[in-house]
Each structure stands twice: as C-alpha cells, then as structure tokens.
Amino acid sequence: MPRYILFSLCIFSALSSCGKKLYQAALPVAPALSSAEELLASYVWKESSVIAYKLLSGDTLVYNISKQFGNTDKDDLSIFREDGTFLFEEGQTKHTPQSAQKYYTGTWQLRTDEKELILKTTHGSDTYQILQLDSSQMVLKLFVKNEKNIYYYQLTYIPIAKSAYCEQKELLAKNSIYTPADQQPQYPGGYKKLLAFLRKKQQYPPEARKKGIEGKVVVQFVVSPEGVPGQFRVVESLGYGCDEAVLQTCQSMGRWQPGKLAGVPVPVQVTLPIVFKL
C-alpha cells in the first residue's frame, strides 16, 4: 500500500552553520544581556516606597520614609541602560532652584549570581542586595553604617514604561526572521504529534503514485511570534503533485509554540523535509 515517511524535522540556516542568522532587518543588534540585566534595562523604574530599618540591640525600629516625605519621592525615576550606565532622575516635585542637581549618572553592574546591584558614581559606590526583580517590581536593600547605628533601606520600584532598549528589542524581533533562535518553535505536543499529524493528513498524489515517483520535498515556513505558521514555500521540489500536496498539508497546521530570542517571541524559519516512498 502506498505510504509516505517523514524524513526529518529540523530548523537550520542554509547560509551559516553556527550562530544566529538575521534576515529582513537592518537594525543594530542590542548587546547580549542576562535575564536579570534584561529586566533592569527594559523599563523605566519609578520609586514607590522607601522604608528604613534601624538595627538596635535586640530590636529593630522601622521608619516608612516614603510616608514621611509624601509626594516628593513619588516621581523619582531610574533608567538602567544596556551599555552599563544609569540615570537617576529626582523628578519635578523634589527639584527646586536650590537643589544641588536634578539628576545624576553613573554605571551599574550585577554580581554575586545577580543578587547584588552595584551603582558607581563620581561620589563613590553603593552595593544593593536584590530582594526581588521581575516585571512587576524591583525591591532593593541598602545597608548604611554611621558612628552610632547600623541601618538599612528597603527601596521598592515599579516599572512605569518601556525603555528605548526594550522598544528596540521588540522592533527588531518583529521585523526579523531568525534561523536559528535561542528557543526553537515547537509543534504542540512535540515531534511525535507533528509526525502523527503529517501521517494522517498527507496524501500521496495519484500522478506520483501512478508513475512510481519517490523522493523528498523540502518546505520552509515562518512561525510568527504568535505561533502562526506562514510564508510557505518549496525549496526542494519533487513534482508530480507532491509539492502541492505538501504545501496543502502544511498550510492546514494550527498554531505552534513560537521560537524565542532572549526570552522574547520572534519569527523563526522552519525547514521541514518530507520523503515520499511507495
């Protein structure tokens, strides 16, 4: 009985054997950052609360500084640029003509398994412990010691806007096709489910079967950031109706799990060879 065999499923670049190949884009590629660095650089962070903890012998006093200062601290902003520099903006409510400065800049760095944030300025260096860092908020802890007491601040920030770096990253992802990406697209259920789908849907064209045609059809398509396959084209033809049969089958596929680059869904090119064998 006539049958077909799925030869292989792979995602590869025909032009490069290693690294990422970028198509349809002339945008600059952002520097590679870790996941925690990505979070810091992707948002404009607004200070939402400051709490001071004074450590005494056998006790701890707590001062909610954010309540003490009222609205004057509520528009402090911090921007961590992808090049390792940062900008701290005090905000309009605090700034007065008598203020020493409205903002200051410096460099930032994560260390100790990304559990510490180091901020350096011309005035010195501060080390913050990272208690929480995700897309909902950032919580930092800063120890301070004077001649009499040891205390620390707990500072909470919330993301209020996407940074220029984040917007560039999203634009690059939207207008580029990657092959390969960090995380490849996957058919729901994986390779076995895709194989089962093809076995069920793929038909052996009558003309090819009548003439005893055997061989391989290679089709390429792009899985969008939403997981929708499209832009189908045959890159290795067999003829006798086999090309059309493969395209028809592939076009009936549902959504895939999209590929990702640096954690962001991106369009990824998939190459799918299918062998016809009597």
Image (tube, rainbow, N blue to C red):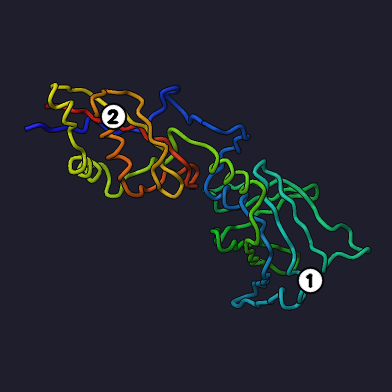
Of residues 177 and 141, which is closer to you in this image? 177
Q: Is residue 105 left or right of residue 192?
A: right
Marks 2 and 1, how far apart at CA = 68 Å
Q: Position of residue 29 (x, y in %)?
A: 60, 35
The vertical placement of 141 against 192, above or below, is below
Q: Is residue 278 left or right of residue 32?
A: left
Disc 1 marks a residue whose amino acid type is Thr
- Residue 243's label in the rendered image is 2
Disc 2 marks a residue whose amino acid type is Asp
Of residues 213 and 23, which is closer to you in this image? 213
Q: Identify the residue at image location x=35%, y=47%.
A: 256
Tell me if mark 1 has few (under 14), some (14-19) or many (20+) residues whose alpha carbon lies within 10 angstroms of its own: some
Q: Quadrant of residue 268?
A: top left
Q: Position of residue 259 (x, y in %)?
A: 42, 43
- Residue 106's label in the rendered image is none
Residue bearing the label numbered 1? 72
The vertical placement of 202 against 105, above or below, is above
Of residues 237 and 130, which is closer to you in this image? 237
Total marks placed: 2
Q: Position of residue 131 (x, y in %)?
A: 55, 61
Which label lies toward us, 2 or 1? 2
User: Considering the numbered disc 2 on the image, is that residue within a helix, a strand or a loop?
Assistant: helix
* Residues at circles 2 and 1 in contact by the CB criterion of under 8 Å: no
